[in-house]
Amino acid sequence: MSEKVSSRKQQVRAADVARHAGVSRVSVSRTFTPGASVSAATRAKVLKSAEILGYRVNRLASSLNRSESGIVALIAAEIDTPYRAAMIAELSDKLQAAGKVTMLINTSGYEERVKDALLQAISFRTEAAIILSGTPDPSLADTCFSNGMKLVLINREEDFPGSLQIGPDNKAAGKTALKALLRAGCQRIALANSGNATWSIVERQKGFLAAAEEAGVEVICEATGVTSYEAGLEIGTALMDREDRPDGVFCTTDLIACGVIDAARQRFGLRTPDDLSVIGFDDIPQAAWEGYDLTTFAQPMDRIIDKCLEWCTTEQPATETVQLPAKFVWRNSVKKALVV
Amino acid sequence: MSEKVSSRKQQVRAADVARHAGVSRVSVSRTFTPGASVSAATRAKVLKSAEILGYRVNRLASSLNRSESGIVALIAAEIDTPYRAAMIAELSDKLQAAGKVTMLINTSGYEERVKDALLQAISFRTEAAIILSGTPDPSLADTCFSNGMKLVLINREEDFPGSLQIGPDNKAAGKTALKALLRAGCQRIALANSGNATWSIVERQKGFLAAAEEAGVEVICEATGVTSYEAGLEIGTALMDREDRPDGVFCTTDLIACGVIDAARQRFGLRTPDDLSVIGFDDIPQAAWEGYDLTTFAQPMDRIIDKCLEWCTTEQPATETVQLPAKFVWRNSVKKALVV
DNA sequence: CCGATTTTTGTACACGGTTGCAATTGCATA
DNA sequence: TATGCAATTGCAACCGTGTACAAAAATCGG
C-alpha cells in the first residue's frame, strides 16, 4: 500500500530485445551498429523482436561512450521573423540531411538568455552551436571548447578565436545599394535603419555611407525601433513627411523596406518606383509579393549553410572569418536607369 | 607513431571536478542535484572547481538513470511559413520557460519524413512529440507510448488514442466567415482553398459550405497548389477572371488571402473592401500590414500552447480532443455592414 | 577429414552520472 | 564527557549502450 510504485518510466531496452530474440545483448547492439559483425540469421531475429517490442536504440545512452551526440544547437531570437525563419528552416533541413539533430534554443527576450542557451548546449554535449542572434560572453566560448564543442557565429563579427564567423558581405552590399540608387537618378537619398544596431546592419549602413561620402552625396538617416515592419512604417512616415522628401531609400532590412513602401503608398499616395525607389536586404518571401516587388539583396544562405556544416564536421577546424557576396536581386522598386 | 591518438573528445567530467576540489565524485553530483544533501563548504569547493574547469553536468548521462530527458520534439513542415514560424517561436519559448528543451524536426519534403521524425524522437527519449504537420503512422504511436512518450497533434484530427488533439474550431470559423460576408452584403461568394487538403483547412471549408447551404447561397470554389501566397495569386486571378466575378472571398489561409488581394489589386485594379471583401485565417503578421489590413481569424495560439504544456507535464494524461474558438479579428478587408 | 582462417558470439569493462545504504562526522543535549 | 540524532559523505550498484578482446563456431583449402 504505502509502497511507492516505481516512477521509472517503462522503456524497451536492448536487453529486452535480446531476451525475446534469444541472443545476447551485444548482438542487439551490433545489429544496430553499421558495419558491426552479426550473422544474417541473428540480425533477422533481432530485427523481428525489436519490431515486435517497439525497440529503438537509446541515443542518449549511445552518445555516452561514442562521445558524439549528433546534436547541433541553433541559438536564435525572433525566430518568427521571415528571414530568421527561412534560415532556421534551411539549417534544420540540411542538418538533418547530414545526420544531425537540431536543438532549437529561442533567445528572444532578455539578453542574458544567450548565455543560458550556450550553457544548455554544453549540458547536452551539443557537437556545435550555431548562433544566429545575440553575442555570447567570450569567457563562455572557452567552456564550449573545453567540452569539445564547435562555435559558429552567423552574421556577426566578434573577437572569437576558435569559431567560424560567417555572413554576407554587408559593406559591399551597402555600396552597391548606393550606386544603384544614384544610377536610378535619385536626387535625395535616405537610409532607413532600425534602432537596435546589430553588427550586420551597422555594416550595411557603413558601406552605404562610405560610398555616399566617396560620391559626395548627402544622406538622410532615419533610424528607430527594432528591426520590423512597424519600424519601417514609422521610418517611412517620418521620411515622407520631410520638406526634402527623399526619392531613394536603402533599407537595411526587407521588413523595414516593406514598411517604408506601405507608409509611402498607404499614407502618402506615393508609388514605387515612380515616386520613390526602395532597396531592401534579405530577400524575404514578401519582397517578391506583387504588392512590393522589392529590389533587394539575397543572403547567400545556401553557401553560408554549406560552409557551416562543412566546418562543423571538420575534425579540428581553424578559426575562420568568411564573407560571402550577397546577390543583388533586381525587381521593380527602383526606377529603371535612364539610358544615356 | 602508428599509435592512433585517441579520437575521444576531451570533456570535463564530474571526476575531474572532484579531484580538483578534493571531494568525492558523488559530492559533485549532489552539488548539482537540487535538494540533495551537501554541506555548504563542500558545495562551495565544488562550485569553484567547476567554474575553473568549465564543468557542466552531462545531461545525456544524467538522463539515463533519471529517465527524464527534458527534451520535447517539435515536428513540423514548412517552418518558414509565417503562421508555422510564429507557432514554433511561441512553443519553443514556453517550453524553455517550463524547463524543457526543444528538438526541432523539419519534415518538409517527402511525407515519409514524419515517420522518421518520430523514430528520431523516440531514439532521443523525447518526453513528448508535438506534431504540427503531417500525420504519423498510427502503429508508430504505440512504439511512442511503449517508450513512455507523449503525443500531441495540433490542428489535425485522427484516430489516435492516447494523444492530445488540439486546434481551433475550424468549422465554426468557416460559418462565421460566411455570415460576415453575407452581412457585408456580398452577392457572389467564393471560397479560395489550397489544393493539398490538410484536415484543418478542409474543416474550414466544410463549415463555410455548410453555412452557405443553410443560407441557400451558391459558393464558387477555387482550389490549387499548396498553401502559399503564390497559390493565392493564382486563385485570385482565376476568380477575378470569371464572368460572375465574386465580391466576397473566404480564404482558408492568410497567405492565400494576401495572394488573392494582390491579384485583385495588382492585376485587375480592384480594391478591398470596396470591390472585393476578403477574409483569411491565421492572423499572420502580414495580415496586419497596411497594404492588406486583412480581416481574419486569430488562432488561439496561447491557449493551445498552454494546454499542450499542461497535458505534457501531466503524469498519465488521458486521450483528449480540444477545440478552441478562433478569435475573429476585424480589420478592413470586408465591407462595413449597411446599417438597416 | 583435418588444420588454418575467418566470422560470429560472449565476457568484461567503459561512458558520465545518480542513488540506496551504511559509515562517518557534527552538533546538541543529558 | 558520554550519548543520541541528524546531517554529510563515500562505497557500490545501476541507468542503457558500445567496443576490445578472447572464445567459439563456421568456412575453406587440401
Image (tube, coloured by chain):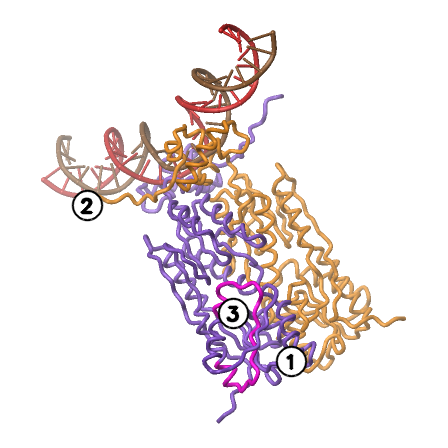
Chain colours: A orange, B purple, C red, D brown
Say above or below: A158 vs B281. above
Closer to the camera, D21 or A84? D21
Residue at the spot of label 3 = B282
What SS does tag 3 mark? loop
Residue at the spot of label 2 = A2
Label 2 or label 3, whichever lies nearer to me, is: 3
**Can the viewer see residue B17 in this picture?**
no
Counting from the top left corner in percent of width and height, residue A236 is at 66, 75
CB atoms of marks 2 and 3 within 8 Å = no
Q: Are marks 2 and 3 on the same chain?
A: no
What SS does tag 1 mark? helix
What SS does tag 2 mark? loop
Q: Amino acid at mark 3?
A: Asp
Counting from the top left corner in percent of width and height, residue B174 is at 48, 74
Q: Amino acid at mark 1?
A: Gln
Q: Are marks 2 and 1 on the same chain?
A: yes
Residue at the spot of label 1 = A266
The span from disc 2 to disc 3 (Cα, nearest Å) is: 51 Å
Which residues fall within the magenta stretch?
B179-204
Say above or below: B184 vs A43. below
